[in-house]
Amino acid sequence: MKDEKLVKLILSDPDRGMRILTDEYAGLIFAVIRKYLSSSLFSYADVEDCAAETLSDAYFGLKNFDASKSSLKTWLCTVAERRAKDALRRYYRSSGTVPLDEAVNVGDVSVEDEAASKAEKEALVKALGKLTRTEREIVVRKFYLSQSSKQIAEEMRLSVSNVDTKTHRAIEKLRRFLEDMQ
């Protein structure tokens, strides 16, 4: 079914439209989510929950879908990615641990941009590896998990000003490392 017809059907007959959308795109949605929630930390039920949340977001966010900007397939992949990344962020915030290779994958990179950004991700991981453990943890918490300086300070037993200073220095180091790599 064409995107526009399916969107109209969902808006006019939500039960039937969402059944068709689910039949057509559930496999894709699961594949996108499993890419982010594939580690042993997440069960199949977690992936199912994330897929259900994705479908709910899609239904309630359908008014934001613009067929002139992307296909329904691409839009659904983006919604699924965001949901999966949110699940990862919630897990890492609650556990207080952040594996570096997982944290880099949590960034907001769309499915279309992923291939182009692979080299950038590799360079970033390499540059992050040159930071001290504390600097790396602060950067990951601040920029990938969106924690405030206050949250980071409390969890790492540092002062807020110390977190801010270390953040600034780490960003400067990263900038230099990345410039040297080019």
Image (cartoon, rainbow, N blue to C red):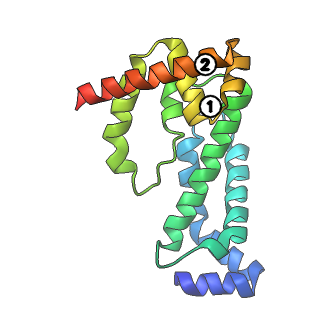
Residue 76 is tagged as none
- 182 relative to 145 in the view: left or right: left
Choose top left, top right, bottom left or bottom right for residue 130. Answer: top left
Give the crowd class for mark 2: few <14, some 14-19, many >=20 residues within 10 Å: many
Residue 28 in view of the camera = no
Choose top left, top right, bottom left or bottom right for residue 10. Answer: bottom right
Determine which residue is flagged by label 2: 163
What percent of the width, then of the height, locates residue 52? Answer: 72, 58
- Out of 104 and 162, give the one closest to the viewer: 162
Location of the C terminus (image quadrant) = top left
**Is the C-beta separation of discs 1 and 2 under 8 Å?**
no
- Out of 85 and 46, give the one closest to the viewer: 85
> Which numbered mark, 1 or 2, is in the foreground of this view?
2
- 78 relative to 17 in the view: left or right: left
Amino acid type at circle 1 is Ser
Element under disc 1: loop
Q: Residue at point 62% right, 34% down? A: 145
**Residue 88 position (above or below residue 25):** above
Location of the N terminus (image quadrant) = bottom right
Mark closer to the chain start, 1 or 2: 1
Q: Residue at point 53% right, 17% down? A: 166
- Out of 146 and 1, give the one closest to the viewer: 146
- 123 relative to 78 in the view: left or right: left
Determine which residue is flagged by label 1: 40
What percent of the width, then of the height, locates residue 135? Answer: 51, 17
